[in-house]
Image: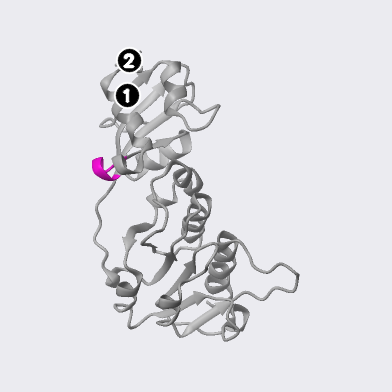
Amino acid sequence: MKITSLNNKKIKEILKLKNIKQIKKSKKYLVEGLHLVEEAIKSNSIEEVFISENFSKNIDFNNNIKVTIIEDDIRKQLGETVNNQGIFAVCKIEEKELDIKKYKNIVILDKIQDPGNLGTIIRTADAFSFDCVILGKETTSLYSQKVIRSMQGSHFHIDCFENVDILSFLSEMKDFDIFATSLDDSSKFLEGISKINDKYAIILGNEANGVSSEILSKVTNKIKIKMDGQAESLNVGVSSAIIMHYIKNIIK
């Protein structure tokens, strides 16, 4: 099948998936580029693939995946990048139950606003074999195009849950070591931690305000990264990588 017009009903519906409200309503989202489409194929998340008539890369499609050819004008409208590769996929949002008993190593995000930071943190959690990422209320959406590009497919490898009440969730984590980043004088340096339980969680906070005081009041392990230079603080994405690397490779 080939679609030649932007007025095609299916294309109009796909273009709506650039809107977060429509994504949540339809429980579908759009991924762009060969790598992300291949990752989506592996995870069995694809509803349909759209390929530009000029697309020349080899890709191994499952026989059950519907593939539609689109003209170049449609490729330009679907893409978020100027010189996109001409391959897109509509993916289904899998409904998962948040069951704390399934997880041991969790990253919790309190009001992270920047899509690049969110994507970087999830990609980092995937790289260091964390098994769950919790997106607290007021954290930016997992399915915005900027977040999807930044994650580079890591959301297919690690369970992510949106719009979670962090305070309520913490009350269920009785057997977890819980660490939260804080610049308070009472915070311990990350580098001074030498022992940790098998079950643990790291809480990272908003770019401007950090972890909220309400959440910090429920946490006994407040940590900060030792910095010898003159910078006041680190980007939350960078901080997440340092902390996850330290916990996974230095302590363990």
Based on the picture, tell me whether residue 206 belongs to the magenta stretch. no
Disc 2 element: strand
Q: Decide: few, some or many residues near mark 1? Use Cα within 10 Å; few <14, some 14-19, many ≥20.
A: some
Identify which amino acid the numbered label 2 is placed on. Answer: Lys
Q: Is residue 46 left or right of residue 235?
A: left
Residue under the point 24% across and 40% down:
26
* Residue 231 horizontal/vertical position (percent): 71, 67
Of residues 188 and 191, the one drawn nearer to the viewer in this rendering: 188
* Residue 27 horizontal/vertical position (percent): 26, 43
Identify which amino acid the numbered label 1 is placed on. Answer: Ile
Query: Which residue has dot 2 on it?
Result: 2
Q: Is residue 1 left or right of residue 201?
A: left
The span from disc 2 to disc 1 (Cα, nearest Å) is 12 Å
Q: Can residue 66 be seen at all in this image of the molecule?
A: no
* Residue 47 horizontal/vertical position (percent): 28, 35
Magenta part, dominant SS = helix
Query: Which residue has dot 1 on it?
Result: 11
- Residue range highlighted in magenta: 24-28
In the rendered picture of this protein, how many numbered marks are placed on residues? Answer: 2
**Which label is found at residue 206?**
none
Residue under the point 50% across and 64% down:
206
- Residue 42 sits above or below residue 104 on the image: above
Quarter of the image where one finds residue 29? top left
